[in-house]
Amino acid sequence: VPLRSDQPTAEDPSITDPAGREAAFGEPDHRRWYGLDIVERLATPGFTVRPYLSENEPVDRLDEYGIKHGEALFLCTKPFHSEVG
């Protein structure tokens, strides 16, 4: 997702055309720039969020997965609840 770590999330649901989204959010299919509140936004539906910085990985491994050096990643997990009965 597009992320700006120096400001809050910016979104505008009234922008619906691809050209407007590209101008506002950098890509024609993006609907927001996530910001400083991304961890809270991911946690709201019940995820446990672990931020991870890609700078801790070798560059060749990052290239293999298409991840930029220094990019923030977020490992999100949620318990599986099975209703058996």
Image (spheres, rainbow, N blue to C red):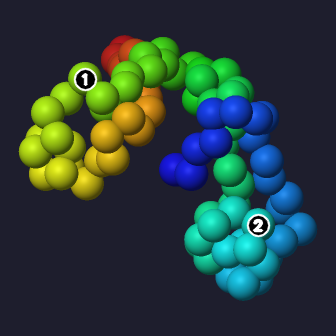
Labels 2 and 1 touching (C-beta < 8 A): no
Q: In the image, is 13 to the left or to the right of 83?
A: right
Does residue 71 appear anywhere in the picture?
A: yes
Which residue is at the front of the view, 79 or 30?
30
Residue 44 higher or lower than 18, as above or below: above
* Number of marks: 2
Compute the Cα span from label 2 to label 1. 31 Å
Who's the residue at 52% across and 50% down the image? 1
Q: Please give the residue where the numbered disc 2 appears in the rendered image.
A: 24
Q: Quadrant of residue 51?
A: top left
Is residue 32 positioned above or below 60 on the image? below
The location of residue 34, given as percent across then percent down, is 66, 43
* Quarter of the figure with the C terminus: top left
Q: Which mark is residue 56?
A: 1
User: Badge 2 local density, few (<14 within 10 Å), some, or many (20+)?
Assistant: some
Q: Amino acid at mark 1?
A: Asn
Type of amino acid at the residue the image marks with label 2: Ala
Crowd tier of the residue under label 1, counting other residues whose Cα lies within 10 Å: few below 14, some 14–19, many 20 or above: few
In which quadrant of the rendered view does residue 62 lie? top left
70 or 17, nearer to the observer: 70
- x%, y% of residue 9? 75, 40
